[in-house]
Amino acid sequence: LIAEGRALRPNDFVGEPEPAVPHSIESCPFCRGNEHATPHELALVNDDQGNWLVRVVPNKYPAVDLASGGREPPAGLAACASDARDLRPPLACEPARGVHEVIIESPRHVRDWTELSSEELATVLRVFRDRIEHAYKAHQMRSALIFKNVGQAAGASLEHVHTQLMALPCVPEVLMREVQIAADHQERTGKCLMCELISDELRQGTRLIAENERFAAIAAYAGRQPYEIWVVPKQHASSFTQLGEEESQRLAAILGETLSLLHSVLAPLASAGDLRPPLAYNVVLHTAPVGEARFAAFHWHWELIPRTTSLAGFEWGTGMFINPVSPERAAIRLRALKSGEKLPIQ
Ligand SMILES: [Zn+2]
Ligand SMILES: [Zn+2]
Ligand SMILES: [Zn+2]
């Protein structure tokens, strides 16, 4: 995606970090009272007094939008191409059409999900579900990605707790690969790969970090970064748009618990001192795209990826990752923290 408007984004990390988090910050566009600093909201969840709890706004610096006309073709090729779509690879391009929204998850100036109550986080999760549904139905999008960047190393430009929704008229490569693998497995065996994986992980237990009636949190078998965790529904469900009321509460509980454990295990390693959260991480929701029957083989899941190591030449050059902490060791340390045991050194 080429999106030059993105260069204009604010960066409130520049300068000295605040030692403590105040209740609200005068200059923060996401705090209650500063609603004029963002575009008009697309959706709201209010409390009984009519104060907002969750606010959805268009991204002020969108990477995609609904009216995008696409790039100008390069000069030499423009003459022979009546339309940018006529360009042949390697210079083909499509208009960057899509939906790019920001979900402001609290009116309070807090920095991550561990500072929301389980109830508040459950409400936020239901807003994600409804906005994905909206992008599919109202704007005919085919795929939707919910993602969260927390901390500078994870690409956040504002610290106030928020998440982004990007919905596209196509299916991005990473998601398509996962969908393809799921669909192939289903066709070959008649079973869901993720359902099989989860029941194996639950039986075996070596990578299991937390579970409740509905969900399991597992140290990813082939984690790209140390402590990469997947949170997966135990029952098969292809799309996050199917999330029920009770499930949203269970999911909030396990996401909150897992993130708290990540904070505890990684805080001592972070160099940022007592700035909360010292942990930089990305959270990504993978949910089935729409439009083809085989997409039902997909099994939705969250991927939590702490950013403790940075991506360098090897990763850019190969698409492979070097992870210095095995998932089994990560799970041992996280489970030990949960039961209050002393953290094993190794
Ligand atoms: Zn704020
Ligand atoms: Zn499944
Ligand atoms: Zn995935």
Image: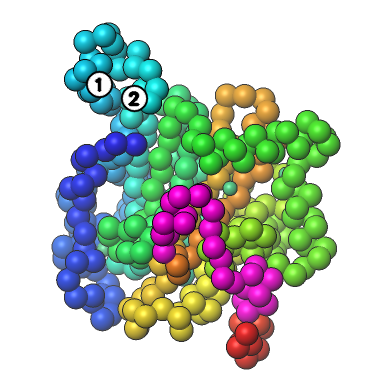
Residue 282 lies, in percent from the top left, at 45, 58
Depth check, front residue: 325 or 270: 325
Depth check, front residue: 78 or 165: 78
Residue 111 lies, in percent from the top left, at 36, 67
Asked whether residue 192 is in view, the answer is yes
Identify the magenta region: 310-335
Residue 244 lies, in percent from the top left, at 61, 47
User: Residue at 30% across / 17% down in the picture?
Assistant: 84
Depth check, front residue: 107 or 199: 199
> Which residue position holds label 2?
91
User: Residue at 49% across / 36% down in the picture?
Assistant: 172
Corner quadrant of residue 223: bottom right
* The label number, if any, that marks residue 73 in the structure image: 1
Distance from the alpha carbon under mark 1 to that under mark 2: 8 Å
Corner quadrant of residue 293: top right
Left or right of 333 in this view: 320: left
Which structural element holds mark 1? loop
Left or right of 267 in this view: 81: left
Q: Quadrant of the N terminus?
A: top left
- In the rendered structure, are the residues bearing label 1 and label 2 in contact, judged by CB atoms less than 8 Å apart? yes
Badge 1, how many Cα within 10 Å: few under 14, some, many 20+?
A: some
User: Residue at 78% across / 31% down in the picture?
Assistant: 187
Corner quadrant of residue 148: bottom left
First reached walking from the N terminus: tag 1 or tag 2: 1
Badge 2, how many Cα within 10 Å: few under 14, some, many 20+?
A: few
- Image: 278 above or below 240: below
* The label number, if any, that marks residue 260 in the structure image: none
Asked whether residue 133 is in view, the answer is no
- Image: 265 above or below 307: below
User: Residue at 41% across / 67% down in the picture?
Assistant: 280
- Image: 295 above or below 24: above
